[in-house]
């Protein structure tokens, strides 16, 4: 498990050897359809040490969902598991790829802080047009978390 991911059964066996708490079972993002990624009850398992040393996040703050659509390709492709750091702080914190909710729709977009509280919202695919979100419109947008990695099946 060089990339820190693996099956639940494999993680359980390794955790038995390495001790309790060696692995983190990442919960799905509340309200996200995770049925694309496998059978019901399927979970994402990461090494605790890897999440802290490589991703530099606290494992308990992580959530996952599966990418739908091609707006973030080639960085994040349809079917990739997106691991995000769930934040209790409002706002961005820094430029990056975020999961946001506008009304009842979950979006994965690249966000950039601009002057006067505006936010540039863009996709990595050139087929999608970027837009600027004025400060007054940003109140209807809920930033759920920052994407810290994507797991892609090979």
Image (cartoon, rainbow, N blue to C red):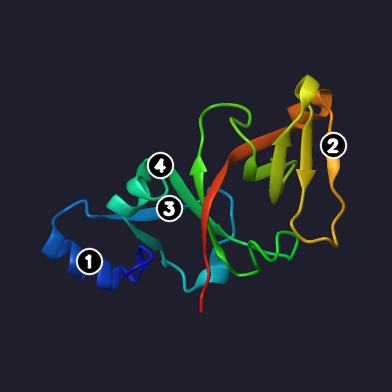
Which residue is tagged 1?
12
SS assignment at label 1: helix
The residue identified by callout 4 is 57
Q: In which quarter of the image is the N terminus?
A: bottom left
Q: Residues within 10 Å of mark 4 (few under 14, many from 20)?
A: some
Tag 4 or tag 2, which sits nearer the N-term? 4
Report the residue at 47% width, 49% height from top.
Answer: 63
Q: Mark 2 points at which residue?
A: 132
Q: Distance between the residues labelled 4 and 1?
A: 22 Å
Q: In terms of image quadrants, where is residue 75?
A: bottom right
Residue at horizontal 27 percent and vertical 72 percent from the top: 9
Nearest-to-viewer mark from 3 and 2 = 2
The image shows residue 126, relative to residue 10, as above or below, that is above
Sequence-first disc among 1 and 2: 1
In the picture, the disc for residue 24 is none
The CA distance from mark 4 to mark 3 is 15 Å
The local secondary structure at tag 2 comes to strand
Identify the mark nearer the N-term, 1 or 3: 1
Q: Which residue is drawn at 38% across and 65% down?
A: 3
Describe residue 139's horizontal placement relative to residue 60 as left or right: right
Horizontal relation, residue 40 to residue 24: left or right: right
Residue at the image position 87 percent from the left and 52 percent from the top = 129
Q: Where is residue 15 in the image (x, y as percent from the top left)?
A: 19, 62
Query: Which residue is under mark 3?
Result: 27
**Is residue 41 shown left or right of residue 30?**
left
User: How far apart are labels 2 and 4 at the CA level?
Assistant: 29 Å
Decide: marks 4, 1 in contact (CB < 8 A)? no
Q: Which of 65 and 3 is in front in this view?
A: 3
Look at the picture and state if 62 lies above or below 80: above
Count of marks, rendered view: 4
- State the SS at label 3: strand
């Amino acid at each position: 498990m060089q990339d820190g991911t693996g099956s639940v059964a494999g993680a359980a066996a390794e955790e038995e050897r390495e001790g309790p708490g060696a692995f983190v079972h990442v919960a799905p993002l509340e309200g996200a359809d995770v049925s694309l990624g496998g059978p019901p009850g399927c979970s994402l398992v990461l090494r605790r040490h890897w999440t802290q040393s490589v991703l530099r996040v606290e494992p308990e703050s992580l959530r996952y969902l599966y990418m739908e659509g091609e707006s973030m390709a080639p960085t994040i492709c349809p079917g990739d598991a997106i691991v995000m750091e769930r934040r209790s702080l409002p706002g961005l914190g820094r430029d990056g790829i975020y999961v946001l909710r506008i009304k009842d729709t979950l979006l994965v977009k690249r966000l950039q802080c601009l002057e006067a509280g505006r936010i540039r919202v863009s996709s990595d695919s050139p087929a999608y047009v970027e837009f600027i979100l004025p400060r007054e419109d940003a109140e209807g947008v809920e930033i759920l978390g920052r994407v810290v990695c994507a797991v892609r099946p090979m």
